[in-house]
Amino acid sequence: MEGVPGLDGLNAQNIRIALSFQSGSLHIVYNDAQPITLEPTIPCSIFLTANGGHATRGGDGGDGHPGENGMSGADATEQMPGQPGTNGTDGANGMDGGSGGHGGHAGDITVCVNEVDADLLCLIEEIEQKGGRHGEGGQPGQGGPGGLGGPGGIYYSWRPDSCHPAPHNISHLETWTMGGGTNGLPGMQGNRGVLGMAGKDGRNGRTTFILQDERGELGYSTMYSRSYQLQIEGFVVETSNDGINEPGETLAVKNIALKNVGNMSTPVQHPFIITGISNDWISFDETGLPIRDPILPGQCCVLPGRLLFKIKDTAIIADNHPLNIDTAITLVARSPRLNKVITVSESKILKIQHPVTLTVFCDKQAMIQDETPPIVLAIKNCSMRAIDARLFRVELTADHHSVFIQNVTGEKSEISSQCFEWQQSLPAHELVVMSSGTLDLSRLCLPNSYTTVRLTAILSVGEWVDSSSLRAIQKQTVNLHVAEPYQYHSDALVTLIVDEDIDAKVIESWTHRLKNVFGSHVNVCDISLYGGINYFFHHQPTSTRQSLTQSFAGKIVVIFDNLFSDEGHHARRATHYLNSTDIFSWAQQHHVRTYVIGNDFKLKEALMPELPQAIARYATTKALIRALRVGRNDDGYQLSVTCPRQSSDQQNRMTIQKQANRLEKTLIKKFPEKRFFTFFSYHVVQHAGLIEVRAGLDVNKAHVIYKNTTDYHGKGIDIYNLFKLMPFVLKLNKVPSYLNKQEEVALLKAILSDLADEQIAMRRVSLNGVFSKIQLRSHLSHLMYLTSFNFEQILQNDHGKIFLKKLFFQLSCFVNKSPSGSGAFFTMNPNRNVIAVCNQAIHAWMKKHKQALGSTDQSIRQDIQYYNHLYADLDPVELQAKFARPYLTESVMQDNWIPVDPALDIHTLPEILSAVVDAPVHQDHFSNEAERLDAIYQAEKRVGGLVL
């Protein structure tokens, strides 16, 4: 069946619309229907649409019928061979697709208006007269497949009943065969039908504007294809002659350029007006400028006269900065009779300012209470002309009592609500000091050692002879951070690095808690007093003759790394004052432990070894190992590698990389508690390579902990992290102390974590490692110190006995159930000597103190079984995470905790990018090899290494 033709689109109806203004109302007659009457005060718009309907596509042709299959041939017999099959018939042709329909024609639109009411044409916003879209032709049908040929008759075979003699008198049976028939030929496939023809688009409509004279249809009329169309081409803003556009001034817009881009002249009887758009800062005259003379089609003209507008005399006071407002000036053409906006111009920006600005100069943003910083109150004329005699007043207040100001004559007066007035003219660009002196806060009663005193100055301007005309135009606030100077206490274990934005209550909470926990002073260094921090300068009393680095050696530094404003009003953090490798150097050379609290600390860069200044080069691995064993203090070590010239550059690079991997494994075996960063490079011309080794931080100690948070004023103090950073000896000294339950649990975890870290570091050595049991005892220093520590005092009370039992039983559980060859911390089988030495030390201590603990051999076995059962459900990785650095667990990491120095085997440069954070970065973390190599390059660039 052929495709059905598509349907044609419907033709649009012609539209005739007449607009008139009668008896103060707007009349609209549509296609001679009853007129629609509207009030002119109600804004309205007319949209005219006469689009043709869209046609439908033609139907698809039907597919041809398949041909018939041929008949089968007769089978063969003894008398007749098989007959051939008949041929299949051809398939029928596909049917043609139907033709697409034609699009409907758009209607014609005629708009009639009297020339007196020509302004009514501006109500027509849009006219749309598009012909309908044509329909596409239908798809042709596919030809039918040909019929299959008939199969030929089957052949026939048989044997006769008698035997025929053969040579040598041997008889045999013969087989006779009658051949089968051939298969018939298949029929041909039918032809594909013809694609249907597409229809035609509908015709677009025509628009006619008929402008009639005052006699209406009886008089003369003119037809136009387009109405008038007015554009505002540009204008000039006439600003103040002193260059400052201040609130209260009246300014003007002039030289307004207009252009008619339509085909009809603009209205004469009811002309349009040009006015501006008022906003929060400027107000235009509603009367505007009328366009009295008609503008012919294509004509440009400049409107005579000036359009006035006023800058509003706002009561808003500029706070801390002079008033500086950018507001838009936008002109519109409007029909006053119809309350209708015709067109809108592009905007120009007007800057609004006060001609006078206030400046409060204060030498200090942070100070100690005994300091007397100078303070100056000054006003400046920012305009290009002198300001006539006016009354200027500056009122200075303070939010604390007993804040005094001393003038140049030595007189002191309290700042409660002081006023300084000045009455005379002010020359252009002149700066006048209204008051100067020094601040005195020595009598100030501070609620705590860290307080902010706020000074507020308000500038008012008015007429010379009328003080009631004063109007406040600017307010400036000065915050004085009053803090205690840095006081060095030699017994202090912890030093807090704070700034002016850290609340005094937070500092007081930290110092009070740490004094109770550690039983020593807490040093507090407010870097706002010193314009930053540098550990190598003397911020404490010079009588100690020590730098901060020297006084912090072996102790803990807590850095509040929040954003604050320095004296130059720049956003800074405490770590911004440090070099990128300072924290690494303090940890490596002076054993300074750092706890950073912030949300933008670059931990990876901080823990990278710095670029060596002096590098020792060795020809063999043995020589490099020997230098490390004797403790040479070189910044870096290099191993020279010579490659065969007959090998390709790619093979040589792989050779150097494999040798670097072997070197790193050797270093782990020889120095399991150390970490080394390995870099390698290849020189194409020289066919030689270099393997560079830089010593990192020890893997068995916590050097830096970073808490990723923006809550710098939280009440909680993470006491576990501080215990974790304490040297192991000091942890054991805290065991006899009276701690609360939370602190006791944190201390127990920290001690177990140190012991677990130490064992994990030594277990990186393989089963056939280089350390004997005797050598291991010297490397397991934490364990040996624990088992030899004098716990007599704590063994005298039951609470202390329970603490030690928990410590040794959980340690025993970790030793015997910890992972053996898998998990994040291990890449090789563990050295079983480590387990043996640990068990021997633990059992010896338990046996020695069995009586003091009030235990028997049976109770000890029961306690060990209890803890083994307690941790039986934990897999090896979970068990390891529970003891070794608990802050590495996934649940804690989701709370924005980032570990710092896990005991990981670093193998390649991509792993260096994350090994100092949580786990090795595998290659599947990069979408392609190019990204991986780019990450390597960026890592080497940061640490100044050699480029691969």
Image (spheres, grey):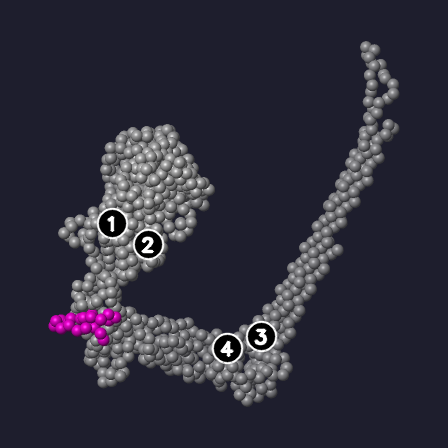
Is 256 rendered above or below residue 217? Answer: above
Q: Read off the residue under disc 3.
A: 48
The Cα atoms of the two marked residues, 2 and 3, are separated by: 72 Å
Q: Read off the residue under disc 4.
A: 228
- Dot placed on the residue nearer the N-terminal end, 2 or 3: 3
Q: Disc 1 residue type?
A: Leu
Which label sits in the foreground, 2 or 3? 2
Could you tell me if the residues under marks 2 and 1 are in contact, i.e. CB atoms within 8 Å?
A: no
Residues shaded magenta: 398-417
Q: Read off the residue under disc 2.
A: 717
At 83% from the left and 33% from the top, the residue drawn is 75
Q: Read off the residue under disc 1.
A: 493
Which image quarter: residue 25?
A: bottom right
The Cα atoms of the two marked residues, 4 and 3, are separated by: 17 Å
Neighbour class for label 1 at 10 Å: few (<14), some, many (≥20)? many
In percent of width and height, residue 854 lies at 34, 40
Neighbour class for label 2 at 10 Å: few (<14), some, many (≥20)? few
